[in-house]
């Protein structure tokens, strides 16, 4: 799985390198475009990374004008994030290149094999996410 991730990151870099956006930044920006707004903790949980790593990526997106971060009106410690128009425009320009990277990663597989791989990966991640949620609730 680690090697497959490395291959995908390499293919993403080849096709999306001109945009100077990492796969993590792309994932975060895509999530924000989909949701409209989310706090940093929610985003970190959604991409299954720690808050420190996620916050660093969000700060870099903010510095480039692709997202806005503001203090939550209900919790001053929380940062609410939302995409800017420049961020939405970037996603639109990147869409085809990102799709090509995804397709290139799965290119050796037939259609049914792709569906099986994705279904199995979702099953594994769902079970582990539920396990981690249970551990968090127990603390």
Image (cartoon, grey):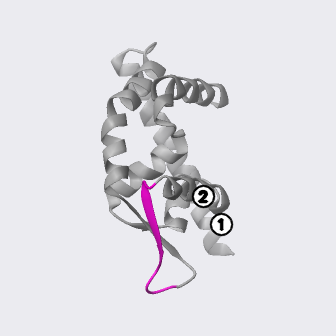
- Determine the residue positioned at 37% across, 66% down: 37
**Which mark identifies residue 59?**
none
Q: Quadrant of the C terminus?
A: bottom right
**Element type where label 2 sits in the image:** helix
- Determine the residue positioned at 43% across, 59% down: 67
- Determine the residue positioned at 34% across, 54% down: 33
Mark 2 touching mark 1, by CB under 8 A? yes
Q: Counting other residues with Cα less than 10 Å from the Cα at mark 2, is it few (<14), some (14-19), or many (20 or more)?
A: few
Residues 96 and 67: in front is 67
Residue 66 sits inside the magenta stretch:
yes
The x, y position of residue 3, in whole percent, is 65, 25
**Which mark identifies residue 131?**
2
The x, y position of residue 39, in whole percent, is 48, 69
Q: Quadrant of the N terminus?
A: top right
Q: Counting other residues with Cα less than 10 Å from the Cα at mark 1, is it few (<14), some (14-19), or many (20 or more)?
A: few
| Relative vertical location of residue 118 with respect to residue 40 in this rendering, above or below | above
| Horizontal relation, residue 8 to residue 2: left or right | left
**Element type where label 1 sits in the image:** helix
Residue 54 sits inside the magenta stretch:
no
Q: What span is colored magenta in the figure?
A: 65-75
The x, y position of residue 41, in whole percent, is 55, 67
Residues 84 and 124: in front is 84
Residues 126 and 28: in front is 28
| Relative vertical location of residue 51 with respect to residue 24 in this rendering, above or below | below
**Which mark identifies residue 135?**
1
């Amino acid at each position: 799985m680690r090697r497959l991730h490395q291959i995908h990151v390499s293919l993403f870099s080849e096709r999306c390198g001109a945009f100077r956006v990492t796969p993590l930044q792309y994932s975060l920006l895509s999530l924000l475009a989909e949701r409209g707004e989310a706090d940093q903790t929610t985003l970190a949980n959604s991409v299954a990374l720690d808050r420190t790593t996620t916050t660093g990526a969000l700060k870099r997106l903010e510095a480039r004008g692709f997202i806005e971060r503001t203090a939550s009106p209900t919790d001053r410690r929380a940062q609410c994030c939302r995409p800017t128009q420049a961020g939405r425009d970037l996603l639109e320009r990147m869409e085809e290149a990102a799709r090509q990277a995804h397709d290139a990663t799965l290119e050796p597989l037939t259609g049914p094999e792709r569906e099986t791989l994705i279904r199995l990966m979702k099953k594994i991640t769902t079970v582990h996410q539920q396990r981690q949620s249970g551990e968090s609730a127990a603390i």
